[in-house]
């Protein structure tokens, strides 16, 4: 799949050009806004026309922007001279680790997947994971200009998941070895952080600067964005909200909490509550057929998720709430239970914007690639 290959025919590993912070900020504005007039860029950055001329010259010389047709941006005034990002100039590689499986995706500057692959690990060693990243990079650079790599997985499940332990074991020496060999950075991070980055920028609407992402799975992950910054915490452990109480008479979780979000809404807890079913999809099918136990368990899960969402809305007042992972399956036909619980807890009359994008494993790898893109383009983002 080579439709996103660089327009100049070059390929390989290409470190992102060193740009002045204001020049980088100008490019980011053009990229995320899908083109802007020169006057609007100058206004957003607070720079003079002369300074903007120098900025655009640097970006043009780097092959990052091109001039477009004049467009009418308002009902009055002359058509504006537009600048557009060259979204095929560089690509970014993301790896998502799920158990022993590694899914790889390459995205261009527009976040579009232009190449993908997969592999199965044979050992538990972090060295093999870094070696697999190198193999993917070698394949991708046959046709693309790759400027950064990110490996993401379920770090929040360290101690419970071998993939999490393997990722966490990728130490600075391995990262330094990779960068010395390839000349571009490799980052390791939590997959929910990657997905939060992917949702946060540029998919927040105009005037929005905060969101909360909740990912439903065997564990429940939370990603938090405030003032366009991902909240990481002093020990990079912010967002552990999965054991907040949501049900007075709920079941007990492995940590001894009764009625916490994990105990009623995690896929493991749901499957334990309906032992005759072998998967969440089967439980949802049973509920659709009217099975009383499956219906009650999923209703309880939807209510618990809505309760937790209400608490999050009270605590952070985000512009947007994003529900991912198995949220579609849990809430299918049960949106009313979720919404009722959210409104019962939420102390504001303002509606919370809720989105439920559907992600498969390639999308998780795409989010990892987007994390590499954002790390390269905006150091202050993290």
Image (cartoon, rainbow, N blue to C red):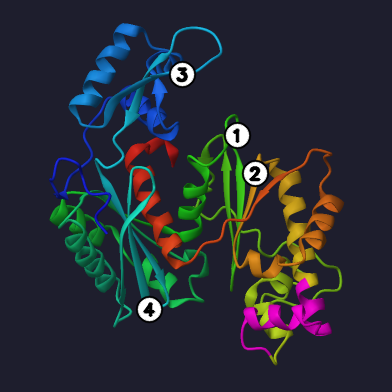
Q: Mark 2 packing: few (<14 Cα in 10 Å), some, or many (20+)?
A: many
Q: Nearer the viewer, mark 4 or mark 1?
A: 1
Residue 204 image point, x, y percent: 56, 39
Counting residues from the start of the chain, the first of labels 2 and 3 encountered is 3
94, above or below 371, in the image: below
Secondary structure at badge 2 equals strand
Counting residues from the start of the chain, the first of labels 4 and 1 encountered is 4
Whether residue 183 is visible to the viewer of this picture, yes or no, is yes
Residue 232 image point, x, y percent: 51, 48
Q: Are marks 1 and 3 in contact (CB under 8 Å)?
A: no
Residue range highlighted in magenta: 277-298
Q: Nearer the viewer, mark 4 or mark 3?
A: 3
Residue 378: name its quadrant: top left
Q: Are marks 4 and 1 in contact (CB under 8 Å)?
A: no
Residue at 71%, 67% (x, y): give it.
332
Residue at 24%, 62% (x, y): give it.
174
Residue at 71%, 50% (x, y): give it.
312
Residue with the mark numbered 4: 100
Where, quadrant-wise, is the N terminus in this rendering? bottom left
Residue with the mark numbered 3: 44
Q: Calculate the distance from the C-alpha at mark 4 to the C-alpha at mark 3.
A: 46 Å
Tell me if 113 is positioned left or right of 242 in this view.
Answer: left
Residue with the mark numbered 1: 208
Residue with the mark numbered 2: 320
Q: Calculate the distance from the C-alpha at mark 2 to the C-alpha at mark 1.
A: 8 Å
Residue at 40%, 61% (x, y): give it.
365
Counting residues from the start of the chain, the first of labels 2 and 1 encountered is 1
Q: Are marks 2 and 1 in contact (CB under 8 Å)?
A: yes
Counting residues from the start of the chain, the first of labels 1 and 3 encountered is 3
The secondary structure that dominates the magenta segment is helix
């Amino acid at each position: 799949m080579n439709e996103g290959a660089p327009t100049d025919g070059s390929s390989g590993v290409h470190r992102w050009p060193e740009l002045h912070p204001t020049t980088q900020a100008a490019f980011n504005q053009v990229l995320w806004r899908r083109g802007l007039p020169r006057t609007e860029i100058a206004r957003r950055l607070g720079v003079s026309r002369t300074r903007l001329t120098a900025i655009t010259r640097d970006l043009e010389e780097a092959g990052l922007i091109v001039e477009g047709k004049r467009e009418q941006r308002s009902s009055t005034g002359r058509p504006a001279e537009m600048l557009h990002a060259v979204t095929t100039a560089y690509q970014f590689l993301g790896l998502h680790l799920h158990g022993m499986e590694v899914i790889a995706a390459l995205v261009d500057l527009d976040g579009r997947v232009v190449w993908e692959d997969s592999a199965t690990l044979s050992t538990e060693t972090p060295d093999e994971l870094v070696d697999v990243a190198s193999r993917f990079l070698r394949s991708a650079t046959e046709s693309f200009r790759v400027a950064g790599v990110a490996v993401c997985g379920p770090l929040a499940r360290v101690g419970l998941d071998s993939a999490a332990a393997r990722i966490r074991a990728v130490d600075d020496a391995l990262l330094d070895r990779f960068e010395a060999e390839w000349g571009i950075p490799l980052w390791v991070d939590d997959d929910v952080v990657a997905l939060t980055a992917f949702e946060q920028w540029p998919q927040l609407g105009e005037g929005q600067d905060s969101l909360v992402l909740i990912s439903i799975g065997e564990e429940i992950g939370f990603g938090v964005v405030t003032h366009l910054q991902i909240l990481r915490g002093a020990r990079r452990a912010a967002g552990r909200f999965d054991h907040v109480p949501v049900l007075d008479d709920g079941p007990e979780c492995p940590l001894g909490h009764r009625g916490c979000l994990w105990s009623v809404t995690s896929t493991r807890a749901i499957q334990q509550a309906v032992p005759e079913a072998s998967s969440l999809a089967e439980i949802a099918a049973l509920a659709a057929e009217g099975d009383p136990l499956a219906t009650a368990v999923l209703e309880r899960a939807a209510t618990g998720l809505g309760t937790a969402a209400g608490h999050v809305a009270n605590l952070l007042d985000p512009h947007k709430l994003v529900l991912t992972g198995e949220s579609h399956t849990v809430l299918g036909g049960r949106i009313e239970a979720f919404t009722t619980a959210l409104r019962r807890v939420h102390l504001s009359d303002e509606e919370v914007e809720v989105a439920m994008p559907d992600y498969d494993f390639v999308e998780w790898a795409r989010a990892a690639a987007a994390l590499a893109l954002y790390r390269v383009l905006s150091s202050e983002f993290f």
